[in-house]
């Protein structure tokens, strides 16, 4: 299913970070996470390209509901294991929110629509 830009979240994660996210999801009831695990596994294939630096963050796209489920799943793991990733995700979301607000303000000022 296609989602509009407003319904998706673009994250940049390293292989280690995406593995931690998958680990958290695996602990959840299968019927609620199997689709997102499949999507994340498909997107993680980019880490296994010959030219890819696994320490370099790669784009991962999630819809809002899947992102919410990921955050809830991370919240069930020990704090010391996930606090760095949660902080990193918060920084990315804050940056996206600021950018979206600025874009909206620019479009309003010029009379265009995003």
Image (tube, rainbow, N blue to C red):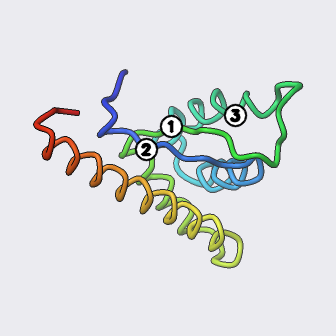
Q: Residue at x 41, y 54 (%)?
A: 68
Instruction: Pick the residue in front: 71 or 11.
Output: 11
Q: Check the picture and name the quadrant holding the C terminus.
A: top left
Residue at the spot of label 3: 44
Per the model, the C-alpha gap separating discs 1 and 3 is 11 Å
Q: Is residue 102 left or right of residue 61?
A: left
Residue at the spot of label 2: 9
Q: Which mark is residue 61?
A: 1
Which callout, 2 or 3, points at the residue further toward the start of the chain? 2
Q: Is residue 97 left or right of residue 11?
A: left
Q: Which mark is residue 82?
A: none
Which callout, 1 or 2, points at the residue further toward the start of the chain? 2
Instruction: Pick the residue in front: 42 or 90.
Output: 90
Under circle 2, the secondary element is strand
Per the model, the C-alpha gap separating discs 1 and 2 is 6 Å
Q: Residues within 10 Å of mark 1 (few under 14, many from 20)?
A: some
Under circle 1, the secondary element is strand
Is label 1 in contact with label 2 (beta carbons under 8 Å)?
A: yes
Q: Is residue 49 left or right of residue 101?
A: right
Q: Residues within 10 Å of mark 3 (few under 14, many from 20)?
A: some
């Amino acid at each position: 299913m296609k989602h509009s830009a407003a319904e998706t979240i673009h994250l940049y994660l390293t292989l280690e970070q995406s593995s931690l996210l998958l680990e958290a999801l695996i602990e959840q009831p299968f019927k609620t996470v199997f689709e997102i695990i499949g999507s994340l596994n498909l997107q993680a294939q980019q880490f296994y390209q010959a030219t890819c630096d696994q320490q370099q963050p790669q784009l991962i796209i999630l819809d809002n509901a899947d992102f919410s489920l990921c955050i809830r799943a991370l919240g069930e793991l020990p704090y010391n294991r996930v606090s760095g990733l949660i902080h990193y995700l918060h920084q990315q979301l804050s940056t996206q929110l600021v950018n979206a607000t600025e874009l909206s303000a620019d479009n309003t000022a010029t009379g265009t629509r995003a």
